[in-house]
Image (cartoon, rainbow, N blue to C red):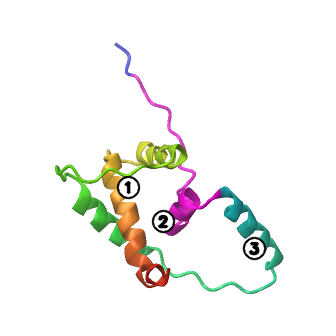
Amino acid sequence: MAKNNRPIIDNPLASMGLDQIVRNITAPETSVESDKKDVEKNADVPQKVARSRRGNMKVFEENLAKYTGINEQGIAIWLPKDVKKNLELIRVNASRNIPLRSLAAAIIMTYISENKNKLNEL
């Protein structure tokens, strides 16, 4: 029998940081559009130097390992369909099998740990 080979799909989120992925998923479309307009207006203003993403991936990997294989029920939350589709896209394009619940928990907890001060100001 011939093997069923899956086509390789390029990951459109590979060049984005974890915080950008979460913001794009959770931000309303109107604010994203207005942010793009603001960026175009402020193109001449020098931007801050981006910090290293290496530490972010390390924290993400630790959170992924922490939340993979947990057998407890947990608490249900509702996600919009497009958020779930983006999570599934990340999961499908990953080089390993990652449970969707573990992926979502790791992304959320990494974002919270990186932006704890900003979130406390809300």
Secondary structure, mark 2, is helix
What secondary structure is the magenta-colored segment mainly? loop
| Residue drawn where x is 55% and y is 66% of the image | 20
Q: Amino acid at mark 2?
A: Leu
Residue 25 point in image, percent of width and height = 54, 56
The N terminus lies in quadrant: top left
Among the 4 quarters of the image, the one containing residue 60: bottom left
Q: Residue furthest top?
A: 1
Q: Which one is nearer the viewer's eye here, 41 or 16? A: 41
Q: Amino acid at mark 3?
A: Val
| Residue drawn where x is 28% and y is 53% of the image | 75
Q: Amino acid at mark 1?
A: Ala
Evaluate if marks 2 and 3 touch, with contact meaning CB atoms under 8 Å apart. no
Secondary structure, mark 1, is helix
**Left or right: 24 as drawn, with respect to 47:** left
Secondary structure, mark 3, is helix
- Residue bearing mark 1: 104
Evaluate if marks 3 and 1 touch, with contact meaning CB atoms under 8 Å apart. no
| Residue drawn where x is 40% and y is 22% of the image | 4
Tell whether position 5 is magenta: yes
In the picture shown, does residue 66 fall above or below 5? below
Q: Which residues are magenta?
A: 4-28
Disc 2/disc 3 C-alpha distance (Å): 20 Å
Q: Earlier in the sequence, mark 2 or mark 3?
A: 2
Disc 3/disc 1 C-alpha distance (Å): 29 Å
The label on residue 72 is none
Q: Which one is nearer the viewer's eye here, 41 or 93? A: 41
- Residue bearing mark 3: 39
In the picture shown, does residue 21 fall above or below 53? above
- Residue bearing mark 2: 18
Residue 92 point in image, percent of width and height = 43, 42
Q: Which one is nearer the viewer's eye here, 15 or 118? A: 118
